[in-house]
Image (cartoon, rainbow, N blue to C red):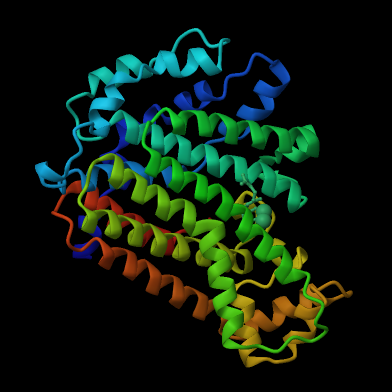
Amino acid sequence: AAKDSMTIDPLRTVAKEMKFLTGNIRKLLGSGHPALDRVAKYYTQAEGKHVRPLIVLLMSRATHLCPKSPRDVAPETSRAIDTSISPMQILSDVNPMTSSTSYESEAAESANLDILPSQRRLAEITELIHTASLLHDDVIDHSVSRRGAPSANLEFGNKMAVLAGDFLLGRASVALARLRNAEVVELLATVIANLVEGEFMQLKNTERDERSPKWSEETLSYYLQKTYLKTASLISKSCRAAALLGNADQHTVEAAYSYGRNLGLAFQLVDDMLDYTRSGQDLGKPAGADLELGLATAPLLFAWKQMPELGALVGRKFAQEGDVQRARQLVLQSDGVEQTRALAYDYSERAIAAIADFPDSEAKDGLIEMAHKTIQRQK
Ligand code: FPP
Ligand code: MG
Ligand code: MG
């Protein structure tokens, strides 16, 4: 009970920055072509959870108190460079259609606060890359709904959805280059490659030609590697980038990365668990979708270890009549869901441990609270 009364709302800590997030993202996405403009901004309409930018902003604030010693700081700090980039300039080159932005005045207003304009831009870039991956993912997964509305592929067709995703990646890349930090560019470019690698591992996983694969320890490590690439890479590398932009010391940069990696793994494990435990209405997207897609995620992999008969179903990607129902039933009879929850809990604890050395701050408490929320979330 004492703990409950002490929980802080992570959003509150960075509420001011979050308030401008969607508007700034929409400005980065402006296109002179009305149809492209519409598809590109489509997923910014419904309020997403904005978990990634929230974490980036909290990490920016929490690592602010761990600067490199002055002699380590390169003469040109990102702070000096950032203030020299006019957001007007960012938009005028790439987007002649947009006439104004409030980003500049807003940046000036917060010039003496501890979140840098470059870190706020990073939060936006992170959400852009995530949204691009959702546009592509919904095509690959033949999704019909996202965030409680028809998915972009359903609303505009596959071609438009794919092109819109590419457009988001293009605009994210321009904004990234404008940060003038080669290490950060390299990190986020690697994330984009990692997303594709993770998606490929997932597809290949479901296209194995073995008729009746056997469970092995490798089954789980393959799944975890795929999960890192597909989900945790973006969160961990953007946490690292946030610390780098703030000129944090090496130890802090590594801690930020470790927090993001463990939180990202916990986040996806919970996602895979909710696919078994929650209804589509709760999720805002169809539930039980993974089995329908032929995907064996953590709850099923744990069940498979106890019930070798699941191997045959995995081998044929749950494609035979009744396979999906049978697999679902076996998973719910096993303790696969519980084991997934326990593993997610483990990772969230590791995320919290990773930042134990950070000086006390409201932002640090916010990061800890995000780790708790990750395993408590219901959708
Ligand atoms: C959602 O997973 C999708 C991802 C986390 C990443 C998908 C990555 C790609 C499609 C690679 C190419 C894309 C880019 C932009 C580089 P999910 O299908 O498990 O979740 P969902 O239930 O929300 O659809
Ligand atoms: Mg999907
Ligand atoms: Mg998918």
Q: Is residue 378 left or right of residue 365?
A: right
Give the image location of residue 365, x and y in percent: 23, 53
Q: Quadrant of the N terminus?
A: bottom left
Judge whether 212 appears above or below 84 on screen.
below
Quadrant of the image occupied by residue 178: top left
Is residue 45 among the parts visible in the rendering? no
Q: Residue at x 59, y 72 (%)?
A: 223
Outermost top residue: 99
Q: Residue furthest left?
A: 70
Q: Nearer the viewer, residue 185 or 352?
A: 185
How many numbered marks does the figure carry?
0
**Residue 307 placement (x, y as % from top left):** 67, 91
The foreground one among 348 and 281 is 348
What residue is drawn where x is 64% and y is 31%? 167
Q: Is residue 250 visible?
A: yes
Q: Residue 342: give x, y in percent of width and height.
A: 44, 77
Q: Image quadrant of ligand 3? A: bottom right
Please tell me whether residue 327 is drawn above or below residue 216 in the rendered image.
Answer: above
Would residue 114 be found to the left or right of residue 235 on screen?
A: left
Between residue 20 and residue 101, name the one nearer to us. Answer: 101
Q: Farthest residue toward the right?
A: 321
Q: Residue 78: x and y, percent?
A: 27, 33
- Please report the residue visible at 47 percent of the width from the left and 61 percent of the height from the top: 267
In the image, residue 57 above or below residue 8: above
**In the picture provided, is 360 more to the left or to the right than 124?**
left
Q: Is residue 35 above or below residue 214?
A: above
Q: What residue do we see at 52% from left, 34% from top?
A: 173
